[in-house]
Every structure is written in structure tokens, then in C-alpha cells.
């Protein structure tokens, strides 16, 4: 009897708390600043049930239903969705001290929970610290010598991948998205560390009917977990960005939160090991002997007596980079570079195979610029001459942007869309919608790379690499990586699509399935 009364009291308290929470939730909703059209939110989840459909974070339906300036909620967080170019112009201006510099607010609990707030670049709100890292990226990753080197690395990784394809035989179904993920992992890992990642081996062993590669089990396992964990870390960013701490630790959800956190910590732990052994290598290298010139060594030596970056830092930033900063930057390069590039290639191949005229024109340009020998190597300068290939990449990105939505927040009150917004408002820039704006693009759904040939206006309207001072610092690397990969694929192979491409939208638009058969074209030796 006593227990029943006790339970009744608990239920009453819970009911009162629930009513208080719901009343507060809707009080905030009905008194919100500048009410805009948008779906009606539910307590605790907001519009998550409408945003997340079949595992995809898709806001395009809100633009269709509520217009170019509308709103939606994830839990109690309000987002202002901007879906035309005029609305985002001010935010994307590359202005020093722009009030729209940050992507997230300082109180983002989820990102803090996984230690990603205010370190590295992407979620760093500390302008001074961001600037130090950003200068590093700008001077190293945008430099011509670095890009030239990465063209060589990409060719070598591709040749390695082809050996596996060759062994598998032309009748094997190639799961293109899996191979591309590993190819870009291998390439970016080598660029970053000068060491191999053995990223293909595990996948090859999984799919081959031939003899398996005889690498030590520990190497295979570690490289595979690395590839998969980087992917999980990228996908989990949105989860931690959107959900408040209280929701992250609700029963049921808590298990998933812990799984994701475990992966983040696994990556961190392993990157720490990589850093430690490189530090040892540096300290054992005699002072008169040249150090390796990769990104990791640059991170570790900047502002030290062994600085190989030719002192890229300025007088304001004369401290060496801490291990924690190196670790976060390293993870960011892998996280930001691999999935974006590998998914881009999948969408590109899908477009090209469904548009034979564009494909033919692209192959003609490649053969005109690089010659007809499909096995000859090429340089960064050769790739720079491939204008139509670049147009193909931009057009694919316009229709199937791999980052379809980015977030920005204002540090002072600002006017957007004729409304004045308090500081800390979250804006979602809907590139998917902006890049298909009917008033600017003729037949926006049509794949037509010609719109980028001799048309400087159209270049401005594609946000493949974002904008503002925070536009992608890996854009030169990404562009040569994509061009080099298209060249190597289409000079050598006829591609047969087996079924349609499957995708979902998370932080990144991800190709979940693209099955192909690859047949060598005439004159190709591997
Ligand atoms: C096809 C490949 C890629 C695409 C489509 C892409 C796209 C983007 C976009 C849209 C942004 C947001 C920009 C903004 O907020 O305005 C971004 C930021 C960023 N990207 Fe990329 N990216 C690619 C490859 C890379 C690579 C290869 C790296 C590094 C190796 C990289 C590193 C970064 C970093 C560190 C940021 C954050 C910059 C900051 O906050 O200052 N990305 N990227």
C-alpha cells in the first residue's frame, strides 16, 4: 500500500514536471523572435521526426512547403533555413571579423561532450586560435608544391588499387563507394604522414576468391577500424551538434551515444600513438639530416628549432603546436577530406554514366590534353588545363552537393531577410535549394556542365567549398584529387553501372551503394 502511494506521488511529480516543460516549450515557441513559416514542433524532439526520414537529414521538403525563408526545430533548437542566394550573400562574404564567422554557438553541449568545440578549425570559435591553424592550412595545403606532390601520391594510390581490381577480374562486381573511401583514405593518409595505411588490403581480402593478402592480422584489423571509425566520427558530428546533453543520455539513446563516443576516442587514441612515434622519429633524426616533409611533421615542428614549414607562423603565434592541437587537426584533415572526396567521385561517376555526351566530351578533353597513352603519368599543370573536367565536377556538385547544408551563427544582432536576429541565431544554408534556384539556373535539375564553360557568373553561385573566411582550406587538394581520379578512371576503363545509386544525407551526402563493373579500354596495361 505504502509503495503504491509512493509510486503515485512520483507519477504526480513527473506529470507536473512534464506539464511545466511542455508549457515552457510552447511559451518559448509562441513568443519566439520573428515567427516564420515552418512545421509545428513537438516538445523534446522539435521537428526531428520530419527532418529525419529513412535515416536522411533532409530539409529540402521544408523549402518546398514553406518557402526560401522558413524555420524548423531539432529538439528545442531553432534553425532559420535560408534557401536562396540573396539570403546568404551577407553570411558568405569573406570579411575579417565577420559576425557570421562561427558555425556553432559556444554552448553547444554535444560537440563539447566529444571535445571538438574550440579546437582545430571547423568548430573553433576562438578566433585567434582558429587563425593560427587556418594560416597553417592556407600556407601548406594551398601551396603549389604540396598540391604537386599530392598529384603524384594520388596516382600511386590509384595504381595500387588497380592491381587489386586486376586480380579480382573484370567480371567481379566492384562496390565503388567502398573502394573510393579506401582510395582517398590511403591517399590522404600518405599525404599527411608519409606512411602507408594499408587501406585496401582488408577490403580486398573480404571480397576476393583468390589468395588473401598476407599482411599481419593486427595491421589489417587496425587499418580497417581506422577507415570505418573516421567515417563514424564524421557521421556522428551531426548527432552531437544537434542533440543537447539531456537527450544524448536518455535511456536507449545513451547506448548509441556511448558507441559513437567510443569510436571518437578510439581514433584519438590511435592518432596520439601516431604523433608519439613521429615525435620520437624526429628527435632521433640528426639535426643536419632533412626531416620528412608531410603535414604531420609540419604540425609537430612548426615554431620549433626544426621547423620545416619555413616559419609559416607570424609574430603573434610563436608557440609550437600542442599534441592536442595536432591530434585535432590531423583528425579534421582525415574527417573533412576522405568522405567528401570519395562521395563526390561516386556522384560524378553516376552522372557521367547517365550522360554519355558529357562523358564523351570529357574523355576527348582528357585525351587532347594528356595524350592517348592511358598509362602515362601527369602533373598538376596538366590537370590545370582540364576545364571541362572541372565544369563536370562543379555541375555534379551543384545538383548533388556532398555538403548540402551548412550552419552559421551570428555573434552580434544582424539583419537577414528583412528581419533583425538576436546574436546566437542558428542559420542553415540550404545549398541544395540555392543551387537549383529556378530564377538563376535554366533547367536546374538537368546535368549540363556547359553552364560553367565561359560563364563566370555561374561559378559564383556554386558553393561546393562554402564561402566566407571559413571556405574549405582543402579545396585545391580536393579539386586535383577529383580531377586526377576522373582522369585515371576514364582514360583506362569503361564503366558499367549495375543498378541505381543509393544515398542518404547526414553531415555529408553519402553514397551508400554504387555497384559497377570495370572493363579496361583498349591499349591499357596494368
Ligand atoms: C570534394 C571535397 C571537399 C568538399 C566538397 C569540401 C567542402 C567543404 C565545405 C562546404 C566546407 C564549409 C565551408 C563554409 O563553412 O563556408 C568545408 C570546410 C572545411 N574543409 Fe572541406 N571539402 C572538401 C575536401 C576537403 C579536404 C581534402 C580537406 C583537408 C584535407 C578539407 C578540410 C576542411 C576543413 C578543415 C574545413 C573547416 C574550415 C574552417 O572552419 O576554417 N576539405 N569543406
Image (cartoon, grey):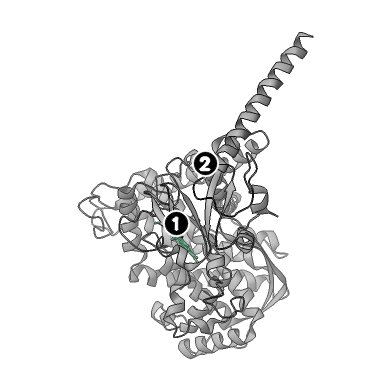
Secondary structure type for disc 1: helix
Give the quadrant of residue 5.
Answer: top right
Identify the disc placed on residue 333. Answer: 1
Name the mark nearer the viewer: 1 or 2.
Answer: 2
| In the image, farthest residue toward the left | 315
Mark 1, Cα crowd under 10 Å, few <14 / some 14-19 / many 20+, is some
Q: Is mark 2 within 8 Å of ligand 1?
A: no
Relative to residue 228, is residue 351 depicted above or below?
below
Pick the front one: 267 or 452:
452
Give the quadrant of residue 503.
Answer: bottom right
- The quadrant of the image that shows the N terminus is top right
Answer yes or no: do the residues labelled 1 and 2 have beta carbons within 8 Å?
no
Q: Is residue 299 left or right of residue 79?
A: left
Q: Is mark 1 within 8 Å of ligand 1?
A: yes
Mark 2, Cα crowd under 10 Å, few <14 / some 14-19 / many 20+, is many
Pick the front one: 503 or 177:
503
Where is mark 2, residue-wise?
110
Ligand 1 lies in which image quarter? Answer: bottom left
Relative to residue 354, is residue 263 depicted above or below?
above
Q: Position of residue 78 (x, y in %)?
A: 54, 47
Identify the disc placed on residue 514. Answer: none
One can see residue 461 in this view: yes
Amino acid at each position: 500500500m505504502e509503495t503504491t502511494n509512493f509510486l503515485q506521488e512520483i507519477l504526480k511529480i513527473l506529470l507536473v514536471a512534464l506539464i511545466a516543460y511542455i508549457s515552457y516549450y510552447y511559451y518559448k515557441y509562441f513568443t519566439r523572435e520573428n515567427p516564420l513559416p515552418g512545421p509545428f514542433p513537438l516538445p523534446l524532439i522539435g521537428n526531428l521526426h520530419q527532418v529525419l526520414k529513412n535515416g536522411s537529414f533532409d530539409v529540402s521538403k521544408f523549402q518546398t512547403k514553406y518557402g526560401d525563408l522558413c524555420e524548423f526545430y531539432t529538439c528545442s533548437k531553432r534553425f532559420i533555413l535560408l534557401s536562396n542566394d540573396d539570403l546568404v550573400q551577407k553570411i558568405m562574404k569573406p570579411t575579417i571579423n565577420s559576425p557570421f564567422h562561427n558555425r556553432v554557438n559556444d554552448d553547444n553541449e554535444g560537440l563539447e561532450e566529444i571535445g571538438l568545440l574550440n579546437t582545430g578549425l571547423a568548430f573553433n570559435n576562438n578566433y585567434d586560435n582558429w587563425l593560427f591553424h587556418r594560416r597553417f592550412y592556407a600556407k601548406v595545403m594551398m601551396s603549389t608544391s604540396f598540391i604537386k606532390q599530392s598529384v603524384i601520391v594520388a596516382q600511386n594510390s590509384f595504381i595500387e588499387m588497380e592491381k587489386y581490381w586486376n586480380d579480382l577480374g573484370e567480371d567481379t562486381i566492384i562496390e565503388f563507394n567502398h573502394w573510393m573511401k579506401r582510395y582517398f583514405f590511403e591517399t590522404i593518409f600518405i599525404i599527411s604522414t608519409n606512411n602507408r595505411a594499408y587501406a585496401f588490403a582488408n577490403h580486398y581480402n573480404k571480397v576476393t576468391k583468390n589468395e588473401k593478402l598476407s599482411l599481419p592480422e593486427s595491421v589489417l584489423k587496425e587499418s580497417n577500424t581506422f577507415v570505418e571509425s573516421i567515417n563514424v566520427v564524421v557521421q556522428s558530428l551531426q548527432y552531437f551538434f544537434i542533440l543537447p546533453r539531456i537527450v544524448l543520455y536518455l535511456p536507449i539513446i545513451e547506448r548509441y551515444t556511448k558507441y559513437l563516443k567510443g569510436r571518437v576516442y578510439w581514433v584519438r587514441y590511435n592518432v596520439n600513438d601516431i604523433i608519439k612515434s613521429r615525435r620520437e622519429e624526429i628527435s632521433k633524426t640528426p639535426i643536419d639530416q632533412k626531416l620528412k616533409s608531410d603535414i604531420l611533421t609540419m604540425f609537430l615542428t612548426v615554431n620549433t628549432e626544426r621547423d620545416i614549414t619555413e616559419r609559416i607562423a607570424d609574430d603573434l603565434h610563436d608557440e609550437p603546436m600542442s599534441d592536442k592541437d595536432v591530434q585535432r587537426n590531423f583528425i579534421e584533415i582525415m574527417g573533412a577530406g576522405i568522405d567528401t572526396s570519395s562521395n563526390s567521385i561516386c556522384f560524378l561517376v553516376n552522372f557521367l554514366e547517365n550522360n554519355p555526351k558529357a562523358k564523351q566530351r570529357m574523355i576527348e578533353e582528357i585525351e587532347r590534353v594528356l595524350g592517348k597513352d592511358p598509362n602515362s603519368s601527369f602533373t598538376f599543370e596538366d590537370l590545370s588545363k582540364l576545364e571541362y573536367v572541372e565544369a563536370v565536377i562543379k555541375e555534379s556538385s551543384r545538383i548533388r552537393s556532398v555538403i548540402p547544408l551548412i550552419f552559421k551563427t551570428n555573434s552580434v544582432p544582424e539583419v537577414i531577410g528583412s528581419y533583425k536576429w538576436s546574436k546566437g541565431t542558428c542559420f542553415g544554408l540550404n545549398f541544395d535549394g540555392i543551387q537549383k534556384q529556378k530564377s538563376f539556373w535554366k533547367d536546374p535539375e538537368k546535368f549540363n556542365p556547359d553552364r560553367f564553360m565561359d560563364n563566370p557568373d555561374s561559378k559564383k553561385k556554386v558553393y561546393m567549398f562554402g564561402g566566407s573566411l571559413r571556405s574549405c582550406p582543402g579545396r585545391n587538394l580536393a579539386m586535383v584529387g577529383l580531377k586526377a581520379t576522373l582522369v585515371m578512371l576514364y582514360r583506362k576503363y569503361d564503366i558499367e553501372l549495375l543498378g541505381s545509386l543509393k544515398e542518404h544525407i547526414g553531415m555529408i551526402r553519402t553514397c551508400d551503394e554504387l555497384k559497377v563493373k570495370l572493363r579496361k579500354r583498349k591499349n591499357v596495361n596494368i
